[in-house]
Amino acid sequence: MRRTLAVAVKELLQLRRDWRVVLTLVVLPMALVLIYGYALSFDVEHVRLVIVDRDGSRAAREVAQAFASSGHFDLAGTSRDVRELDRLFDSGRAQAALVVPAGYGAALAARRPTALQLVLDGADSQTATTVLAYARHIVASVTPAVRGENGGGPVVAAPLVWFNPDLASARFLVPGLVAFILMITAVIATALAVVREKERGTMESLRATPLGALELLAGKALPYLLIASAAAAGSLALAWALFDVPVRGSLGWLALVTVLYLVGGLGWGVLVSTLADSQQVAFQVSLLSSMLPTMLLSGFIFPISSMPAALQWISHIVPARYYLVALRAIVLKGAGPEMWWQQVVGLSVYAAVVGALATARTVRSL
């Protein structure tokens, strides 16, 4: 442990002399959150819908069938109890719920105005906006048929948005930006730190010490883990101050998941450094291997459910896929670990596999 700390102290002293690296690692993530938080806006497709039929009438079944057969929704289940929605939304099994109130069919038959309630998961504002537009279209199209058969009055879709009532896109985008930026900075910083030792010839000196491969890797990565953690805290604080993105869940759980995510990113950076002999090559490989998968295959921009099956399978080796689900669940929904423990398992497996590969490669190089 003392030898690992000695390497970490050496790295910190080197960083103190090169303050531009620290400035980049801390300020750049916050600057990117600020810029992209204002600039980005995305659309999504595919909606997991739960139908809560509290009426049981023929008219209720017809409107439920209209939603299920519209092609815009994937029916995730049916229920007669609205209390089940908490569990379904927290676990991510539902993104929307159509609640048909008791007396819906009778109100139509009596020619009284009635309402269908649409419950939306506002944590994903783009999906919620799309769902609301689809729902209004379906209700408008099914109302004339209902009126013609029953002689009823107009049917109104009354939306109820959870987690993000005003459908602010920043609350959906900013957590994704945090995951995206942290992965890039963690991988690049670690890869460059190790390759720098090769270019300067100091790696030969490290080989002459009694340091083991694991001690060397831990010592090199520890300072960047601390700096990246500080950058994550600063980015989330900035998101709260400027974009009103609160942390509704436990800060302790959030810190644990973030550190686990960063450990995987740092391990990948070390692995890249064992394959590159110059900082230029390390930078390019780090950027491409961290930026593109995190942006395209994590669910940050494009919903994973709308991807081809092959890409959905490949996305399982992208750590941001797991981190994004857990991050949004903790920050926006305040959900506990029982709702995102599978994401922690995914991050743990990724960190363990990448760490083992990085250690094995470092042992060979030493």
Image (cartoon, grey):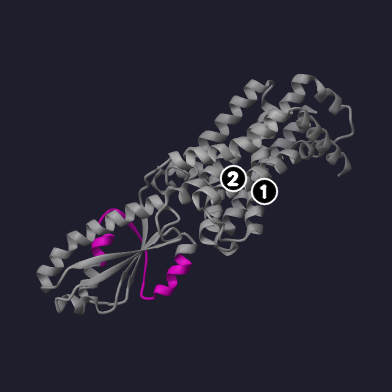
> Residue 186, can we see it?
no
Return the residue nearer the eye: 275 or 327: 327
Q: Which quadrant of the figure has residue 53?
A: bottom left
Q: Which residue is mark 1?
A: 259
Q: Which residue is mark 2?
A: 235
Which one is closest to the eye, mark 1 or mark 2?
2
Local secondary structure at mark 2:
helix
Left/right of residue 200 with respect to residue 277 in the rendered view: right
- Which residue type carries mark 1? Val
Q: Indicate the position of residue 212 as horizontal and vertical percent values.
A: 84, 36
Local secondary structure at mark 1:
helix
For marks 1 and 2 on the same chain, the one whose residue lies earlier in the sequence: 2
- Which residue type carries mark 2? Ser
Residue name at image x 74 percent, y 20 percent: 199
User: Does residue 65 belong to the magenta stretch?
Assistant: yes
Please report the bounds of the magenta region as a residue range.
64-88
On residue 209, the disc is none
Q: Indicate the position of residue 22 as horizontal and vertical percent values.
A: 69, 34
Q: Residue furthest front?
A: 241
Left/right of residue 188 with respect to residue 77 in the rendered view: right
Return the residue nearer the eye: 351 or 28: 28
